[in-house]
Amino acid sequence: MIYQNSENVWCRNCFICGTEIIHNGVHGESNARFSDKLKRKCKKCSNIQRSKSLKGKPITEEHKNHISEAQRSDRAFWYGKTRSTDTKRKMSNARIGIKLSKETKQKLSEQKIGKNNHRYGKKATEEHREKMRIAALNRIKKQGIMVAFNPIACKFIEEFGKKNNYKFQHALNGGEVCLSGFPVDGFDKDKNIVFEYDESYHYYNKRKEKDKYEQQCIIKKINPKLFIRYDEKNNRLYDALTNLDLSQ
């Protein structure tokens, strides 16, 4: 059954849920009659039916490739498009005050547990990890958050550099340089020399493991001439590459 609403626009009802479906335009009436004759459903009911029909059916590799290609470059729906500030504000305001039910929270939690997690059984490559670290640092900079630094370490690095004819860039001299996604305490780009100042908290097991991992990533990335570390706890200055003492 088709009809005209109060604004004289042709409409019909979904034959499953009864939702009003509007047919605008010059051919509104003919489209409404044709759709009503074929008993076409509303978008919501169509999606539900499509979802049920596909449930349990595996997607072929060819189909996956088609979906992937459709999301790339200029073929993607949002390619070259940006939402206006007004649209972003409306989207943000629409979410204000909305609280998820306990049932919804539980479902969202279950979707990310074990085999339901899309990353289950997968391991990020070193290249991927580096990209994630750099992205995280960029987010921090964009938010205007200042990364904590030790002014005593900066002074120590500066004095050591002047004494040995090194030009280290550090937090108080151009800002810390990011190498392989890790900000280092000091870096002489011209001579390819890294300087790390290890305070007392660097000697906890987890932190020691993290320092070792960071050092390996940086060495693999830039192959520095020297990787100088200062052990504040034991007052030891050495090259981590050769374990050579540099305090003299």
Image: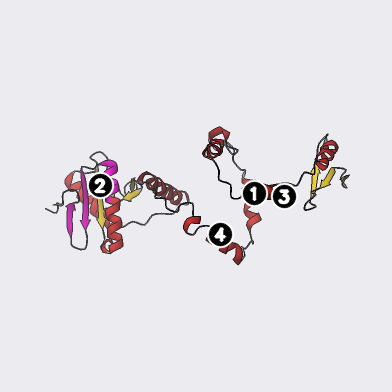
Q: Nearer the viewer, mark 3 or mark 2?
A: 3
Name the residue type under label 3: Cys
Please rate how many residues cluster around mark 2, counting C-alpha atoms within 10 Å: few if below 14, some from 14 to 19, many from 20. Answer: many
Q: Are the residues tagged 2 and 4 within 8 Å (C-beta)? A: no
Q: Determine the CA span between mark 2 and mark 1.
A: 56 Å
Taking the image as shown, residue 229 lies to the left or right of residue 1, namely left
Q: Is residue 186 magenta?
A: no
N-terminal of the pair, mark 4 or mark 1, is 1
Name the residue type under label 4: Leu
Residue closer to the observer: 189 or 227? 227
N-terminal of the pair, mark 3 or mark 4, is 3
Name the residue type under label 1: Ser
Q: Which residue is mark 4?
A: 108
Q: Position of residue 210 (x, y in %)?
A: 30, 56
Q: Which residue is mark 1?
A: 51
- Compared to residue 132, the image places residue 205 above or below, namely below
N-terminal of the pair, mark 3 or mark 2, is 3
Q: Position of residue 189 (x, y in %)?
A: 27, 40
Q: Nearer the viewer, mark 2 or mark 4?
A: 4
Q: Which residue is mark 3?
A: 45
Residue closer to the observer: 211 or 200? 211
Q: Determine the CA span between mark 3 and mark 1.
A: 10 Å
**Magenta stretch bounds:** 215-240
Q: Are the residues tagged 4 and 1 within 8 Å (C-beta)? A: no
The residue shown at (25%, 63%) is 203
Tell me the SS state at disc 2: strand
Q: Nearer the viewer, mark 2 or mark 1?
A: 1
Name the residue type under label 2: Val
Q: Determine the CA span between mark 3 and mark 4.
A: 23 Å
Q: Which residue is mark 2?
A: 194
